[in-house]
Amino acid sequence: MMMMELRKIEERAGRLLSLEGKVAMVTGAASGIGRGISIRLAEMGAFVAVLDIEETKGRETATEIEAHGGEAVFLKCDVRSAADCRRAVETMIERSGKIDILCNCAGIAIRKDIVELTEDEWDLAFDVTLKGIYLLSREVVPHMVRNGGGSIINIGSGWSLKGGPRAASYCAAKGGVVNLTRAMAIDHGKHNIRVNCVCPGDVETPMLASECAQLGADRGEFMREAANRPLARVGTPDDIADAVLFLASRMSSWITGAALVVDGGGLA
Ligand SMILES: NC(=O)c1ccc[n+]([C@@H]2O[C@H](COP(=O)([O-])OP(=O)(O)OC[C@H]3O[C@@H](n4cnc5c(N)ncnc54)[C@H](O)[C@@H]3O)[C@@H](O)[C@H]2O)c1
């Protein structure tokens, strides 16, 4: 009897987390966290558009999904380009007729203070991190409205909520991601579009390796410091993908405008 009930609970949880029949777009999906999110959403049944400027690695993400029985397509898209964002959305609408889930994950980390930063680097950080969310979301939202709703998940950072050293443009742009998320949640809630933000702590990806190199830090020491948090390890793309899955699914149907910190307790 007990086992039966447990199985029923598991079946119900599986149904609530299932993305069968859903169409998802993920940016920054050629690498690291975006790649992990794409794979997780596809595993749960979504048809996933893998968006990135990196063509070779982006195609690899889509191929890997298909090799495991999932459905995916790679679309080359520079999120700084209004034309690229429009084309990617048009392609998905022609192909699938709708977009249920958008995860804005593309990002770039420049580890400099404001004196070291060039104006071009400042603009690059804002264009990729913040303007990209605006450019792609404004194309997707009208289709979500037409389709009766959707879920948008923006990837912020622990440094959306607190500052960090030699990361001025990153902290500024990521801080903006959280409040843009709230503004979008307020504007589009009436159309059943939920907009949330996931704020990861240090996750082992090429970006983290690049930050270590930019700071000229010793790799071992850098990783030990990154793991110095209550749960005593750095994160994995899967840790973040699970949070995104929750926010993409029916499990979170009354959650919007939230900033969900996923960082092993680093900000605690
Ligand atoms: N890794 C971490 O420790 C960490 C921590 C907090 C937040 N984040 C955030 O998570 C997201 C993913 O980071 P990651 O660690 O997987 O980095 P990553 O460098 O492994 O992947 C970033 C991806 O974004 C793509 N990209 C960059 N500019 C783009 C553009 N203009 N258009 C389209 N795609 C573009 C890159 O080609 C790359 O595939 C970023 O927004 C990052 O700020 C990462």
Image: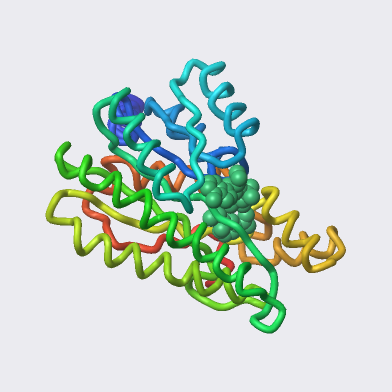
Point out the residue furthest to the front here.
83
Q: Residue 225's x, y, as percent?
A: 75, 67
Q: Nearer the viewer, residue 131 or 11?
A: 131
**Residue 120 locus on image (x, y percent):** 61, 68
Report which quarter residue 169 is drawn in.
bottom right
Colouring scheme, one of rainbow, by chain, secondary structure, one colour? rainbow
Who's the residue at 40% across and 49% down the image?
A: 82
Pinpoint residue 209: horizontal percent, then vertical percent: 75, 54
Q: Nearer the viewer, residue 40 or 107?
A: 107
Q: Is residue 77 above or below residue 260?
A: above
Q: Is residue 43 above or below residue 227?
A: above
Give the left or right position of residue 5, taking residue 210 as reference.
left
Percent position of residue 127, x then y? 50, 61
Residue positioned 18% across, 56% down in the render: 189
Which quarter shows the N terminus? top left
Snapshot quadrant of residue 125: bottom right
Which residue is located at x 48 percent, y 53 percent? Answer: 80
Q: Examine the rendering and report whether any part of residue 197 can be seen.
A: yes
Q: Decide: is 208 above or below 18.
A: below
Give the residue displayed 35% in from the left and 66% down from the top: 180
Q: Is residue 2 visible?
A: no
